[in-house]
Image (cartoon, helix red, strand yellow):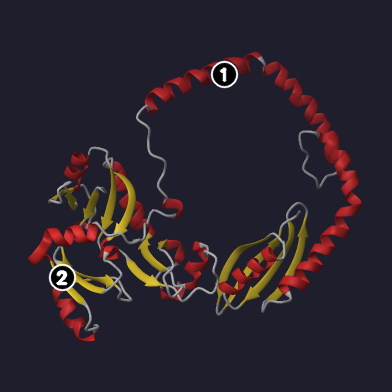
Amino acid sequence: MKTWLYLTAEGMGAPCANWRCCVWSPSGERRCLPLHEAARELNGRVVDVLLPMEMCSWMRSDPWPSRRQPRPQALAFAVEEQLSENLEALHIGIGLRDRQQRYPLLVIQRARFQALLALLDAHGIDARAIHVDAELIAEDKAFGVRWFGRWLLGGALPARMALSAQALATLKPSLSEDIHWLGEATDRPGIDEWLLGTEGHPINLLQGEFRRRRQRLPWRGAAMAVLGMFVLTWALDEARIGFLHNETRRLYAQGEQQFRSLYPWQDPVVDLAAQFQALQQRRGQNQVTQVARLVRLTEQVVGASPVEVQEIEFREHEGWKIQLTANSFIELEQLRERGQQNGLPLTLGSASKQNNRVQATLTLEDS
């Protein structure tokens, strides 16, 4: 059974140790108390943190044309026009694709989310996942749920919102008539159990750079002491063989200097003799192979796509780099997938959007 820690909307304006929280006992009893007391009561247990919908925004992408799972960057570019801030200032959590091939997204200010994680960490709260309350509503029907003094709208509705009673009264005439309304005043324990026991797939905000780290081990202190002993032993061994290492470095440096004088564009490896022989054999073959790969890329991939090529450049050990522009980021994704289907290892980088065009660098990696 999950252990839930709910950070209510009352304290989100000034997050601190006195943030009003709620925890539930195994029997389902609700207990409201400040964050610092909740942390002491949880005593290091792994919890699922629940945030109020007021801290986030919710949206859905357009139907995604590809069957493959899109990269987070691609989805972010797809909904960029719906956002009020730059992508760099936001953290976006991505949910599962729905039946209409759309992806739900939760958006929160990056700095705000970082501050929240720091606050939880400072109180010793180990969060396994971080969800949003309106995301817990079952998706089989449209629901409006009275919970913790405000109305949550979600489920089968094309939105996730938290409204005061006054705001709901204003908005209600424009809402669908088939919404099922539930009030905590009549059955608060039942609604708590219904929301927290959902078997759906709410978005977990611990994604990407904020993905949960491996759980701390209780014997970490003892392990650090043992590690310190090994480090000390290693340092003594290093002192004993330092002279031999210095001589090895000196001889290798001489060989490396001679190698660089012959091949100034080539980075030397450990086995200089084997590298020298390989360079002599590949020198005549490499030029023909790289040109053939470029022709194949141009005919089978780029030529069949509605993109414009601006510049083509070849770099040793990096491959062909092609600067191009397209109408959308989706076209770039389709271009990369077409390359993989033709056996060409393509990567996209340095993507940026200017006016109505997307600029990016397409790299055909050196084989």
Q: Quadrant of residue 243?
A: top right
Amino acid type, residue under disc 1 in the picture: Ala
Q: Secondary structure at mark 1?
A: helix
Q: Secondary structure at mark 2?
A: strand
Q: Residues within 10 Å of mark 2 (few under 14, many from 20)?
A: some
Q: Quadrant of residue 161?
A: bottom left
At a point 52% along the width and 21% down the height, the residue shown is 231
Residue placed under numbered mark 1 in the picture: 235
Q: Is residue 13 visible?
A: no
What's the distance in space between the residues labelled 1 and 2, CA to CA? 67 Å
Sequence-wise, which precedes: disc 1 or disc 2?
2
Q: Are marks 1 and 2 in contact (CB under 8 Å)?
A: no
Give whichever of 132, 155 is nearer the camera: 155
Residue placed under numbered mark 2 in the picture: 182
Q: Residues within 10 Å of mark 1 (few under 14, many from 20)?
A: few
Q: Quadrant of residue 257?
A: top right
Q: Is residue 44 above or below residue 321?
A: above
Residue 3 appears at what percent x and percent y? 24, 47
Residue 192 appears at what percent x and percent y? 17, 59
245 lies left or right of 93: right
At a point 22% along the width and 56% down the height, the residue shown is 14
Residue 43 appears at what percent x and percent y? 23, 37
Amino acid type, residue under disc 2 in the picture: Leu
